[in-house]
Image (cartoon, helix red, strand yellow):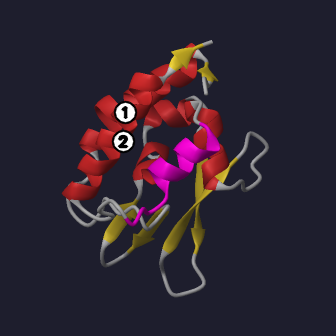
Amino acid sequence: MKHDVTQEQLDRFRHLIQFVIPNAPDDHGFDMTEWGKQTPDCGTHACALGWAAQDPSFQQAGLNHRWAKADFGKSGLLRFLDARGDEVPPLRIAQEFFGLTLWEADDLFMPNSTRHVVGPRAKRDFLERAREILAERSVA
């Protein structure tokens, strides 16, 4: 089934693949089991969407987030926000910001039992799947 996407969404998705994810940490900081978590001892751990939220150009384009205090200690948890500042589900943000279907957003940004979830292999797996989706993409 054809899924139309705007040029702006397509450009954002390309930027994610070409610049944001390749520059994310290669170690345990790239963690597809965490939307985003900051701890004093371990620094920032985040999935691809969490690292996208750290990109200044994406922030300027409206990928809004905040770090909320976790109920357990000094950790901060990443929360995604709409234009009004209300919390929204991360997959909805991924769909709207990058022009993905729900299935694509789930496949890319949720931990997947068929792919690695932490470290450099997880990053490679994410990029491989993202490039497949990009190749299928059409512009509205």
What are the residue bounds of the magenta stretch?
101-113
Tell me the amino acid under the disc marked 1: Glu
Q: Is residue 73 above or below residue 87?
A: below
In the image, residue 52 lies at what x, y percent?
Answer: 44, 43
In the image, residue 12 lies at what x, y percent?
Answer: 48, 27
Could you classify mark 2 by the number of other residues whose Cα lies within 10 Å: few (under 14), some (14-19), or many (20 or more)?
some
Secondary element under disc 1, as helix, strand or loop, is: helix
In the rendered image, the residue lying farthest to the bottom is: 72
Q: CA distance from mark 1 to mark 2?
A: 5 Å
Tell me the amino acid under the disc marked 2: Arg
User: Is residue 130 found inside the magenta-colored segment of the image?
Assistant: no
Q: Dot 1 corresponds to which residue? A: 132
Q: Residue at x 26, y 42 (%)?
A: 23
In the image, residue 81 lies at what x, y percent?
Answer: 68, 50
Q: Is residue 3 above or below residue 35?
A: above
Q: Dot 2 corresponds to which residue? A: 129
Secondary element under disc 2, as helix, strand or loop, is: helix
Q: Magenta stretch mostly in which secondary structure?
A: helix
Q: Is residue 42 above or below residue 104?
A: below
In the rendered image, the residue lying farthest to the front is: 1
Q: Which of 51 and 136 lies nearest the eye of the viewer? A: 136
> Which label belongs to residue 65?
none
Q: Are marks 1 and 2 in contact (CB under 8 Å)?
A: yes
**Is 116 placed left or right of 71 in the picture?**
left
